[in-house]
Image (cartoon, rainbow, N blue to C red):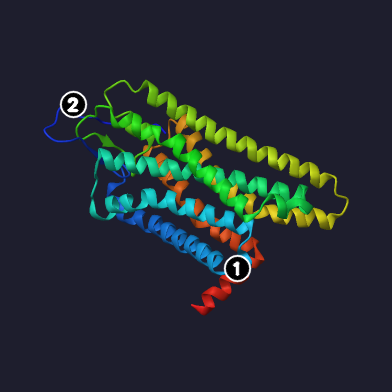
C-alpha cells in the first residue's frame, strides 16, 4: 500500500522515531472516529473469543469445519489486534510516536496474520470441496490431525514469506522523525521512509502480494469451480440446496475478507481525486470488518454452532 511520507533531515542525535499521524485532515474528529472503530474491534474480540471458547469446550464441535473456524477466529483476532491498540492510543491520547523496532514488529504481525487468514480461507475451500465432491471419503481425508497439519503449513508459509520483510528493512538507514500519514505501519510505508537502496524490499513486497493474493484466490476459485461442476451433476433440487447451504458461510467470509481490501486497493490506485483520509479509513476497515462479521456469519449460518453458543451464553 502506497502512502505519502514526509521525511525530515537524515541526521538525529538519537535513534529514529516514526510518527503515525492517525487520519490526516480529520485530527479534530479522532475521538469521534474512535467510537465506531473501537466498537468494531470489541465486537470482533467478543465474537471470536466466544467461538474459540465454545468450540474448545464442546466436544461435539471437535470437527474439521469448526477447527478451521477457530483458526479463522485466531487470525481475525491477530490482524485487528495488530493495529487497533496503537490506533486507539493515537485517537485517545495523541501518542503518535513509534520506534523503528515497534513499527517493524507491527508490520510483521499484521502481514503474518493476513497471510495466515488467506491460507485458512483456502483450506476452508478445500474442506467444502471434499465435503461436497467426495462426501463418502470426507472423514478419512480431512481428519482433525490433517487440519492441524494444514494449519501448521499455513503458519510456516506465513512466517517464511513475511519474515524477510522486516529483516530486509532492519538494516536500512531511516530518516529521523519521519511522518507516516496513517494509523499503522505497513511494508510500503516503512520502505518509503528509508533513504537507502530499497529495490529488493520493494520487489519482494510486490512479489509476496501477488503470490499470496492471486494464488490463494485462484485456488479458492478452482475449488468452487469443481464444486459447481459437481452440483450441476445432481438432479435433485433438495440436494442442490443442501450442498449450497454448506458453502454459504464460507462464501460470505470470502466476500467480507476480499471485498474491502479489493475496494481499498482500487480506490488507492485509480481514485486520485479521493481524499487521503478516505483511503486510510478504508484500510483500517479492511482489518476491522472481517473479524467483526465472520463470527456473526458463521453463527447465523451454522445451526449447530448457534445452538452451542446459545447454551454457552445461558450457562454464563
Secondary structure type for disc 1: helix
Give the residue pinned by disc 2. Answer: 10
**Neighbour tally class for label 2: few under 14, some 14-19, many 20 plus, Cα within 10 Å:** some
**Is residue 22 left or right of 246 when viewed as pictured?**
left
Q: Residue at x 80, y 47 (%)?
A: 231
> Observer-nearest residue: 119 or 269?
119
**Is residue 132 left or right of 179 when viewed as pictured?**
right
Residue 188 position within the rendered picture, expressed as x and y whole percent measured from the top left: 38, 31
Q: How many angstroms separate mark 1 from mark 2 (CA)?
A: 58 Å
Residue 85 position within the rendered picture, expressed as x and y whole percent measured from the top left: 33, 53
Q: State whether residue 93 is above or below residue 46.
A: above
Instruction: Report how many numbered discs are placed on residues in the image.
Output: 2
Point out the frontmost of discs 1 and 2. 1
> Observer-nearest residue: 143 or 106?
143
Disc assigned to residue 243: none
Where is residue 178, by image quadrant? top left
Residue 34 visible here: yes
Q: Residue at x 13, y 35 (%)?
A: 14
**Is residue 139 left or right of 13 when viewed as pictured?**
right
**Is residue 45 left or right of 252 when viewed as pictured?**
left
**Neighbour tally class for label 1: few under 14, some 14-19, many 20 plus, Cα within 10 Å:** few
Q: Residue at x 45, y 51 (%)?
A: 288
Q: Residue at x 51, y 62 (%)?
A: 52
> Observer-nearest residue: 296 or 57?
57
Residue 40 position within the rendered picture, expressed as x and y whole percent measured from the top left: 44, 57
Residue 300 position within the rendered picture, expressed as x and y whole percent measured from the top left: 62, 63
Where is residue 173, by image quadrant? top left
Give the residue pinned by disc 1. Answer: 59
Specify which label sits upstream in the sequence, 1 or 2: 2
Most distant residue in the left direction: 13
Amino acid at each position: 500500500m502506497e502512502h505519502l511520507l514526509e521525511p525530515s533531515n537524515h541526521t538525529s542525535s538519537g535513534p529514529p522515531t516514526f510518527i503515525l499521524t492517525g487520519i490526516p485532515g480529520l485530527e479534530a474528529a479522532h475521538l469521534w472516529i474512535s467510537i465506531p472503530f473501537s466498537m468494531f474491534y470489541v465486537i470482533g474480540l467478543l465474537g471470536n473469543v466466544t467461538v474459540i471458547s465454545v468450540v474448545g469446550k464442546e466436544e461435539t464441535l471437535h470437527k474439521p469445519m469448526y477447527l478451521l473456524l477457530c483458526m479463522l477466529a485466531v487470525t481475525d483476532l491477530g490482524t485487528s489486534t495488530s493495529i487497533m491498540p496503537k490506533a486507539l492510543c493515537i485517537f485517545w491520547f495523541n501518542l503518535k510516536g513509534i520506534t523503528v523496532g515497534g513499527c517493524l514488529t507491527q508490520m510483521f504481525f499484521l502481514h503474518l496474520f493476513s497471510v495466515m487468514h488467506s491460507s485458512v480461507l483456502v483450506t476452508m475451500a478445500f474442506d467444502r470441496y471434499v465435503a461436497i465432491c467426495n462426501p463418502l471419503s470426507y472423514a478419512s481425508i480431512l481428519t482433525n490431525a490433517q487440519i492441524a497439519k494444514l494449519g501448521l503449513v499455513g503458519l510456516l508459509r506465513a512466517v517464511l514469506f513475511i519474515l524477510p520483510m522486516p529483516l530486509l528493512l532492519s538494516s536500512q538507514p531511516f530518516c529521523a522523525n519521519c511522518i507516516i500519514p496513517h494509523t499503522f505501519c505497513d511494508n510500503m510505508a516503512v520502505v518509503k521512509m528509508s533513504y537507502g537502496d530499497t529495490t529488493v524490499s520493494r520487489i519482494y513486497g510486490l512479489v509476496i502480494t501477488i503470490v499470496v493474493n492471486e494464488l490463494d484466490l485462484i485456488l479458492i476459485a478452482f475449488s468452487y469451480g469443481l464444486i459447481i461442476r459437481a452440483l450441476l451433476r445432481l438432479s435433485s433440487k433438495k440436494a442442490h440446496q443442501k450442498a449450497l447451504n454448506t458453502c454459504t458461510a464460507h462464501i460470505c467470509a470470502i466476500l467480507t475478507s476480499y471485498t474491502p481490501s479489493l475496494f481499498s486497493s482500487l480506490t488507492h490506485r485509480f481514485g486520485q481525486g479521493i481524499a487521503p483520509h478516505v483511503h486510510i479509513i478504508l484500510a483500517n476497515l479492511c482489518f476491522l470488518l472481517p473479524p467483526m462479521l465472520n463470527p456473526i456469519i458463521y453463527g447465523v449460518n451454522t445451526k449447530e454452532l448457534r445452538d452451542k453458543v446459545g447454551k454457552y451464553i445461558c450457562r454464563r
